[in-house]
Image (cartoon, rainbow, N blue to C red):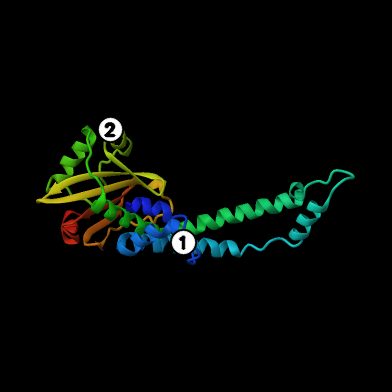
């Protein structure tokens, strides 16, 4: 089982541990315990799911809802009874609840932006460690050559044509349902993996103007944004080697 397969299974795991005895989750849970990156991702997912559940529990059912349902179930014969959920008052209330749920979900997404950024960095590090790397195409090769030059500084605006790179053979992955492209290059004898995604696909991520860097699972990483894209650079050479490129 790969980490991506485990994530797919664990995305259905309910917060609170009520699914702990379900054999469907057994192998995925074991892998999350053994793999620090997967474990960190799972912990973030559980916190987010618990937050959504807590907010939804704050939505109180309208007074008389139970009685209205029972009255509709008992009604028979005589004039046709208009279903309670088709009455204007109830329809307006249902619409209000739907809007509230939508607003809650959006607020939680935006509030969890730093956690989403942490997931993105974990995703990039995990793929660097376990992914099958390689790209082809003129656009990818040209960007590879540019990034390999010692005079090229990362950490700011890069000439990334996302659509062209994706369409002409650049390695493309999926993160949270959106495309991420990867460019691999070598600088000073060390291998580096640059992951790029379109900022418009992730409006909830923090629009930080600075560069964040650190170490995860023995790999150095750095992340930053430009006007249209968000990047994560990963290398086994360590965080200092990455900072030297920024």
Question: What residue occupies the far left of the structure in this picture?
Answer: 189
Q: Which percent across, then down, holds residue 225? A: 31, 51
Residue at figure coordinates x 51%, y 55% from the top left? 106
Q: Which residue is mark 2?
A: 168
Callout 1: helix, strand or loop?
helix
Q: Which percent across, then down, holds residue 92? A: 71, 51
Q: Which residue is mark 1?
A: 48
Q: Which percent across, then down, holds residue 80? A: 85, 43
Residue at figure coordinates x 17%, y 45% from the top left? 185
In the picture, which quadrant includes the C terminus?
bottom left
Question: On the rendered structure, is 45 left or right of 103?
Answer: left
Question: What residue occupies the far front of the structure in this picture?
Answer: 23
**CB under 8 Å between discs 1 and 2:** no
Does residue 230 sit above or below 144 in this rendering?
below
The answer to which of marks 1 and 2 sits earlier in the sequence is 1
In front of the other: 211 or 196: 196
Callout 2: helix, strand or loop?
loop
């Amino acid at each position: 089982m790969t980490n991506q397969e485990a994530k797919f299974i664990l995305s259905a795991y309910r917060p609170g541990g009520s699914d702990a005895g379900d054999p469907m989750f057994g192998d995925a849970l074991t892998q999350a315990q053994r793999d620090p990156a997967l474990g960190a991702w799972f912990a973030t997912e559980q916190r987010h799911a618990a937050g959504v559940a807590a907010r939804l529990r704050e939505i109180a059912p309208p007074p008389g809802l139970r009685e209205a349902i029972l009255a509709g179930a008992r009604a028979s014969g005589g004039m046709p009874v208009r279903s309670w959920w088709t009455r204007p008052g109830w329809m307006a209330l249902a619409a209000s609840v739907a809007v509230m749920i939508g607003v809650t979900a959006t607020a939680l997404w935006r509030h969890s932006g730093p956690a989403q950024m942490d997931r993105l960095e974990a995703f990039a590090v995990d793929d660097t460690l376990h992914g099958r790397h390689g790209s082809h195409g003129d656009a990818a090769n040209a960007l590879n050559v540019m990034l390999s030059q010692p005079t090229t500084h990362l950490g700011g605006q890069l000439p990334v044509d996302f659509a062209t790179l994706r369409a002409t053979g650049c390695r493309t992955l999926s993160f949270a349902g959106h495309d991420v492209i990867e460019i691999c290059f070598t600088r000073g004898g060390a291998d580096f993996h640059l992951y790029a995604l379109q900022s418009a696909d992730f409006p909830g991520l923090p629009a930080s103007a600075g560069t964040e860097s650190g170490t995860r699972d023995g790999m150095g990483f750095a992340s930053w944004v430009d006007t249209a894209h968000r990047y994560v650079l990963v290398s086994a050479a360590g965080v200092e080697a990455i900072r030297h490129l920024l």
